[in-house]
């Protein structure tokens, strides 16, 4: 599978990894800015084997998964989504040629050869994109629309879905306690210390999570940066439930999701005691410079 180079065009202007993968990648941020670029590249790990092929003509659907063995599998996914996974950004932070970023799609199979954590897997995917697709980009800071997450009412620090845990960190829990907390039958288990996002169900669940994690998940749902201005610094059990807005995608709500439920804005205010306030602010973006257009099969 090493360095398999083929390509193809297919429409794919839609989000991917909408199920399990979104939960898998939700809790991690890769921090490499403290190292020179050349040193980052030299130290970055690579997959033992990786294949990036064009999606076959007429392919429908798309998505992916990460297996515990360190294997990544994706079908009919576009470059923009692969970059969100690799560089820990949301898709609105990636700008450039929409044909290369959104319309051209790929099937990806990559194997680390051993179990790896998500930060390591992100670095391996960076290596694959830059080596095989010759991906080149630069970063800029632009003034863009953002949301500020603030207290809904001065002096009121939380709603029923945001409960501060005063008993310390996850190290104080037994194995069973640290394993999971579930907010609803439709939501998968949430490990202690994580805040999981399940966008197609309209769920954010957290166990001893932080505001930094919550605003990251909200940024993903809302498609713009959310800045934490709550002043809340503790660890929280988080339970947020809303009805996803699928009008732009034409998708159907999954079973168990209330079509008459609250919007995410209403849910944040009523369930968390917080408020999303629209404004503008500095946002770091990734600007696509060039990409190898691989030959078709």
Image: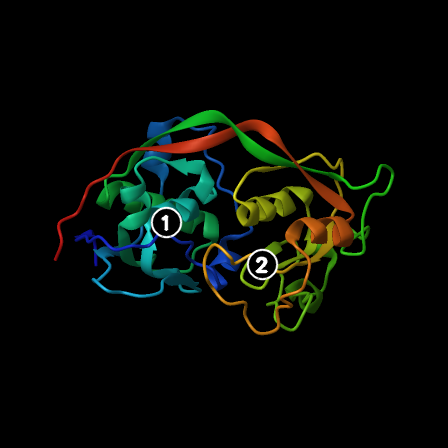
Residues under numbered marks 2 and 1 in contact, where contact means CB atoms less than 8 Å apart: no
Classify mark 1: residues with Cα within 10 Å, few (<14), some (14-19) or many (20+). many
Check the image and report above or below for 145 versus 74.
Answer: above
Residue 38 at x, y = what percent? 33, 29
83 relative position to 225: left or right: left
Report the quarter where the C terminus lies. Answer: bottom left
What residue is rendered at 43% in x and 58% in y?
Answer: 17
Whether residue 124 is visible: no
Task: Name the residue tied to disc 2.
Answer: 244
What residue is rendered at 54% in x and 70% in y?
Answer: 254
Residue closer to the observer: 110 or 200? 200
Which numbered disc covers residue 55?
none
What residue is rendered at 53% in x and 52% in y?
Answer: 26
Q: Nearer the viewer, mark 2 or mark 1?
A: 2
Judged from the image, the secondary structure of the residue bearing numbered disc 1 is helix
* Residue 274 placement: quadrant: top right
Residue 295 at x, y = what percent? 13, 49
Residue 142 at x, y = what percent? 48, 25
The first of marks 2 and 1 along the sequence is 1
Residue 258 at x, y = what percent? 65, 68
Residue closer to the observer: 42 or 243? 243
Residue closer to the observer: 254 or 227? 254
Q: How is the image coloured?
A: rainbow
Judged from the image, the secondary structure of the residue bearing numbered disc 2 is loop
275 relative position to 135: left or right: right
What residue is rendered at 40% in x and 33% in y?
Answer: 286
Whether residue 86 is visible: yes
Task: Name the residue tied to disc 1.
Answer: 82
Marks 2 and 1 sit apart, C-alpha to C-alpha, by: 23 Å
Classify mark 2: residues with Cα within 10 Å, few (<14), some (14-19) or many (20+). many
Report the quarter where the N terminus lies. Answer: bottom left
* Residue 145 placement: quadrant: top right
């Amino acid at each position: 599978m090493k360095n398999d180079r083929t390509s193809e065009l297919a429409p794919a202007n839609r989000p991917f990894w909408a199920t399990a993968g979104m939960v898998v990648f939700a809790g991690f941020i890769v921090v490499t800015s403290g190292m020179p670029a050349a040193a980052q590249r030299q130290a970055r790990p690579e997959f033992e084997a990786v294949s990036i092929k064009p999606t076959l003509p007429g392919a429908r659907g798309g998505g992916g998964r990460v297996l515990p063995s360190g294997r990544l599998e994706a079908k009919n996914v576009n470059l923009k989504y692969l970059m969100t996974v690799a560089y820990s950004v949301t898709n609105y932070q990636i700008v450039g040629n929409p044909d290369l970023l959104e319309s051209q799609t790929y099937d990806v199979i990559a194997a680390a050869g051993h179990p790896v954590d998500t930060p390591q897997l992100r670095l391996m995917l960076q290596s694959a994109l830059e080596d095989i697709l010759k991906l080149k980009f630069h970063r800029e800071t632009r003034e863009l629309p953002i949301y500020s997450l603030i207290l809904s009412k001065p002096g009121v620090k939380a709603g029923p879905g945001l409960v501060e845990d005063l008993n310390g960190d996850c190290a104080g829990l037994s194995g069973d306690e640290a394993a999971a907390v579930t907010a609803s039958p439709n939501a998968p288990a949430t490990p202690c210390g994580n805040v999981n996002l399940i966008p197609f169900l309209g769920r954010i669940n957290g166990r001893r999570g932080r505001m930094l994690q919550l605003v990251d998940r909200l940024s993903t749902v809302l498609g713009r940066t959310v800045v934490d201005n709550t002043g809340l610094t503790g660890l929280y059990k988080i339970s947020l439930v809303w009805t996803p807005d699928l009008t732009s995608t034409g998708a159907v709500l999954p079973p168990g999701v209330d079509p008459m439920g609250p919007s995410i804005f209403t849910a944040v205010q009523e369930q968390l005691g917080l408020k999303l306030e629209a404004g503008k602010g500095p946002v770091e973006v990734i600007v696509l410079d060039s990409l190898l257009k691989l030959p078709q099969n």
